[in-house]
Image: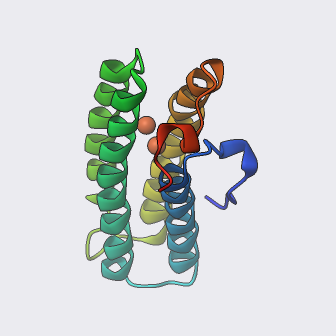
Amino acid sequence: MINIDWSPAFQMGVGKIDEAHAGHLELLKGMTKLIHWGESPSEIRTWAEQLHHDFLSHNQEEEILMANLGYPELTEHQAVHTFLSSEIGDQVGHFTENADQTTMMRAVSRIGHMLLDHMIRHDLTILTFMQGRGLTEARLGLNG
Ligand SMILES: [Fe+2]
Ligand SMILES: [Fe+2]
């Protein structure tokens, strides 16, 4: 069951990035509720596809941020994004017409764990890098 609320502990201090991460958690929570309520797999698949789409466009923004920062682990981080996008795509494939609740809950749970793990282990490392150089969103000129 994925029911994790947005927390300041996840905050990177870059508006667009934080909004996207919070949006991913909201979609996961919404999907969990819909599955629990017995919503049709096709409806939940729509949410899963939305999440996958949001993840892809968010990654592009995050990669631009890393490039602008001169972040040294950009290439590795990009490779993780590519891998995760493919893994999430595979999980979206589980939301077939006849998918049962257990299968769908398992797929949502896998997506949730992958996203959370990535946010905590990789994305927050960008924040550590920014803090080490005294960089903020305002100083990067990203909030205008
Ligand atoms: Fe990332
Ligand atoms: Fe991210």
Residue 133 in the image: above or below residue 16 = above
Residue 74 in the image: above or below residue 10 = above
Residue 9 pos. (x, y %)? 73, 43
Q: Which residue is located at x 35 percent, y 44 percent?
A: 59
Q: Residue furthest top?
A: 72
In this view of the protein, which residue sits in the foreground, 96 or 28? 28
In this view of the protein, which residue sits in the foreground, 1 or 46? 46
Q: Is residue 92 visible?
A: yes
Residue 7 pos. (x, y %)? 73, 52
Instruction: Please state if 81 lies on the left or on the right of 115 as rendered.
Output: left
Q: Which residue is located at x 29 percent, y 33 percent?
A: 83
Q: Quadrant of the N terminus?
A: bottom right
Instruction: Please state if 97 lies on the left or on the right of 111 as rendered.
Output: left
In this view of the protein, which residue sits in the foreground, 55 or 62? 62
Count of numbered circles on the image:
0
Looking at the picture, the colour scheme in use is rainbow
Instruction: Please state if 15 lies on the left or on the right of 51 as rendered.
Output: right
Residue 113 pos. (x, y %)? 54, 44
Q: Is residue 1 visible?
A: no
Residue 71 pos. (x, y %)? 42, 21
Q: Hey, which quadrant is residue 132 in on the image?
A: top right
Q: Which residue is located at x 47 percent, y 47 percent?
A: 110
Q: Which residue is located at x 57 percent, y 26 percent?
A: 130
